[in-house]
Amino acid sequence: MQMKAVSTDEPSRLVQSLTGAILDCGGWVLSRGANDTGAINMLFEFERQACVEIYSVLIAAGLELSPNGHMRFTELCQCTRSQQRNCGGEIASVDLEVQTYPAEIVGTVPCTGQM
């Protein structure tokens, strides 16, 4: 599953915290990195039975997932919950792209709580 997100965290700090959070949930980080423009790319996998925990740690890490990312993760969690016996042990793969922005830029835009 490909997902996009934005964050105001410093890229190297975000990579480190996301990696730890994913590992703590039993996931595997296959690749990770940040470039000079503040973009982060992570490829990770996890057993579907941990999808709610993975979704939660992405949000707790300060990621603002795209509307499509929220929808796809919600569908994965609901499908897994309803079919736990059949698919709980299956592996889900996420190719995550995060664009980070300096806090001073984000701080100039009022937070409306709407997407």
Image (cartoon, rainbow, N blue to C red):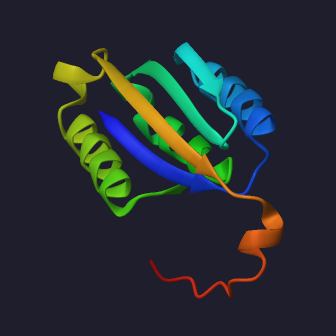
**Of 106 and 66, the residue lying toward us:** 106
Which quadrant of the view contains residue 92?
top left
**Of 64 and 87, the residue lying toward us:** 64
**How many numbered callouts?**
0
Q: Position of residue 107 (x, y in %)?
A: 78, 77
Which quadrant of the view contains residue 66?
bottom left
Q: Is residue 109 above or below residue 90?
A: below
Instruction: Give the residue displayed 38% in from the left and 42% down from the top.
Output: 3
Q: Is residue 38 above or below residue 7?
A: above
Tell me the quadrant of the picture where the N terminus can be found. top left
Instruction: Give the residue displayed 56% in from the left and 82% down from the top.
Output: 113
**Of 77 and 3, the residue lying toward us:** 3
Instruction: Give the residue displayed 72% in from the left and 57% down from the top.
Output: 8
Q: Is residue 13 above or below residue 65?
A: above
Which quadrant of the view contains residue 52?
top left
Position of 41 compared to 91: left or right? Answer: right
Q: Position of residue 94 (x, y in %)?
A: 39, 29
Position of 71 compared to 5: left or right? Answer: left
Position of 5 compared to 93: left or right? Answer: right
**Of 68 and 38, the residue lying toward us:** 38
Q: Position of residue 97 (x, y in %)?
A: 48, 39
Instruction: Give the residue displayed 76% in from the left and 28% down from the top.
Output: 16
Tell me the quadrant of the picture where the C terminus can be found. bottom left
Q: Position of residue 71 (x, y in %)?
A: 29, 56
Position of 66 compared to 20: left or right? Answer: left
